[in-house]
């Protein structure tokens, strides 16, 4: 059993999973703009550390992309390996797009929540750079820490890369305010933008789904042109 293997307070994560209403990984297969009724958000950048918006790119960018993704979703990992690097180079690093990452857990629930919380706790000391370092590692090593015999030990190794001890990890995944924060992010994604699967992308308030660089690039070019009108 994954819960016993992790020794991460099973009841805590059962409650958390119910509150988060787990999404499907890779449930949407085509890029069609969805009329969700959600306007583009004005991000609150006042929070720091684990409770901050995890962003890349200029705050002055005319286009904001919010990705809803799960650290246990292989489709999300594939996007971050094969598509995101080119998007970052062409749009984020050049100041055209501000990219926001929000967690939207998928099965297995306990691991998805624990991994998300670990990445956010890393930001308490190392800021967003530490968050995205852990996030990238979680995606790249999914098969090891999700499907290996000792997921807890693998997460401890990942935590160590961010300067966190085993005790730090245990304290991290019992932070109620952090679980509440993740729950609220999921609620916004589900209720405001109708997110039901991962990865999902909200481009200036419109829900989109992409699997290739070409599809996402075309949508971003369109959004940039529209924002400049």
Image (tube, rainbow, N blue to C red):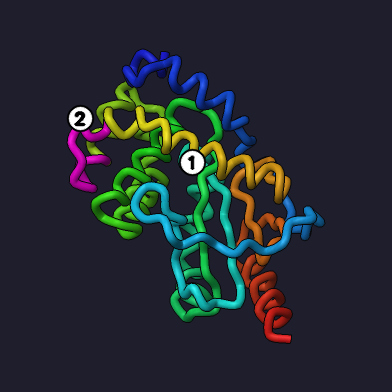
Sequence-wise, which precedes: disc 1 or disc 2? 2
Quadrant of image for the C terminus = bottom right
Residue 161 magenta-highlighted: yes
Q: Secondary structure at mark 2?
A: helix
| Residue at (30% x, 26% y) in the render | 152
What main secondary structure does the magenta stretch of the protein show? Answer: helix
Q: Secondary structure at mark 1?
A: helix
**In this image, 82 relative to 207: left or right?**
left
Residue 103 magenta-highlighted: no
In front here: 195 or 221? 195
Mark sitting on residue 167? 2
| Residue at (46% x, 62% y) in the render | 45
Q: Position of residue 56 (x, y in %)?
A: 44, 66
Real-space Cα separation, disc 1 to disc 2, in angstroms: 22 Å
| Residue at (41% x, 28% y) in the render | 147
Q: Position of residue 200 (x, y in %)?
A: 63, 51
Mark sitting on residue 149? none
When the figure is inspected, residue 93 is found, relative to residue 51, above or below; the finding is below
In front here: 127 or 160? 127
Q: Which residue is mark 1?
A: 181
| Residue at (58% x, 24% y) in the render | 18
What's the magenta region? 159-169
């Amino acid at each position: 059993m994954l819960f016993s293997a992790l020794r991460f307070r099973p009841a805590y994560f059962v409650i958390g999973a119910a509150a988060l209403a787990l999404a499907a990984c890779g449930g949407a297969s085509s890029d069609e703009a969805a009329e969700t009724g959600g306007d583009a958000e004005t991000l609150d950048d006042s929070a720091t550390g684990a409770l901050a918006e995890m962003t890349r790119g200029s705050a002055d960018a005319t286009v904001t992309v919010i990705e809803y993704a799960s650290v246990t979703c292989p489709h999300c990992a594939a996007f971050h390996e094969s598509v995101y690097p080119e998007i970052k180079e062409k749009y984020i690093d050049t100041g055209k797009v501000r990219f926001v990452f929000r967690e939207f857990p998928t099965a297995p629930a306990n691991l998805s929540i624990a991994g998300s919380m670990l990445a956010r706790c890393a930001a308490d000391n190392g800021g967003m750079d530490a968050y995205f370092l852990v996030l990238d590692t979680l995606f790249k090593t999914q098969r090891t820490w999700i499907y290996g015999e000792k997921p807890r030990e693998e997460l401890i190794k990942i935590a160590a890369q961010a300067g966190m001890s085993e005790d730090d990890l245990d304290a991290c995944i019992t932070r109620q305010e952090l679980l509440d924060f993740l729950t609220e992010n999921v609620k916004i994604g589900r209720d405001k933008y109708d997110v039901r699967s991962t990865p999902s992308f909200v481009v200036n308030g419109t829900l989109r789904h992409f699997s290739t660089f070409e599809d996402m690039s075309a949508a971003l070019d369109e959004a940039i042109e529209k924002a400049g009108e």
